[in-house]
C-alpha cells in the first residue's frame, strides 16, 4: 500500500509508515473533505474509514482517512489506491 500511495496519490497528501499494525493514517491538505471522498469511493467499490471517526469531537480530521491493508491481495490494494487517487 505504501508503494501504491507513493505512486498514485497527490504530492500534497502524506501518510504514516506503520510497523506491525494494520492501518495507514493518511492526511490531505487543509480544507479537503474526506466525507466527499468516502461517498465517491463507495460508489466505486472502495471503502475506507474517514479519520474524523477516530477523533473525539467527530468534527476535526475531515482531511484524514484510515486505510486497512490486511487480508487483501496486493493487486486489490493497488486498484483501490489508484481508484482513490483518481477520485482525488
Image (cartoon, grey):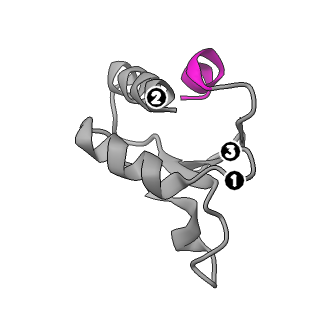
Q: Which one is nearer the viewer's eye here, 60 or 56?
A: 60
| Number of residues whose C-alpha sits closer than 10 Å to that of mark 2, classed few (under 14), some (14–19) or many (20 or more) | many
Q: Is residue 36 left or right of residue 10?
A: left
- Magenta-colored stretch includes residue 66: no
Q: Residue furthest top?
A: 7
- Indicate whether 58 appears above or below 79: below
Q: Which residue is mark 2?
A: 81
Q: Which residue is mark 1?
A: 31
Q: Which one is nearer the viewer's eye here, 59 or 48?
A: 59
Disc nearest the viewer among 2 and 1: 1
Asked if residue 81 can be seen in this view, the reply is: yes
SS at badge 2: helix
Where in the figure is residue 24, as x and y percent of width and height? 60, 46
Q: Kindly report the distance in space between the C-alpha atoms of the residues bearing marks 3 and 1.
A: 8 Å
Image point 50% across, 46% down: which residue? 67
SS at badge 1: loop
Q: Is residue 38 left or right of residue 19?
A: left
Image point 33% across, 25% down: which residue? 76
Q: Residue furthest bottom?
A: 57
Q: Which residue is mark 3?
A: 28
Amino acid at each position: 500500500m505504501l508503494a501504491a500511495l507513493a505512486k498514485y496519490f497527490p504530492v500534497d497528501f502524506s501518510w504514516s509508515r506503520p510497523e506491525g499494525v494494520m492501518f495507514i493514517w493518511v492526511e490531505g491538505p487543509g480544507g479537503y473533505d474526506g466525507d466527499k471522498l468516502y461517498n465517491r469511493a463507495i460508489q466505486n467499490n472502495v471503502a475506507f474509514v474517514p479519520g474524523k471517526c477516530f477523533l473525539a469531537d467527530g468534527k476535526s480530521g475531515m482531511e484524514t482517512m484510515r486505510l486497512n491493508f490486511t487480508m487483501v491481495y496486493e493487486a486489490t490494494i493497488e486498484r483501490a489506491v489508484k481508484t482513490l487517487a483518481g477520485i482525488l
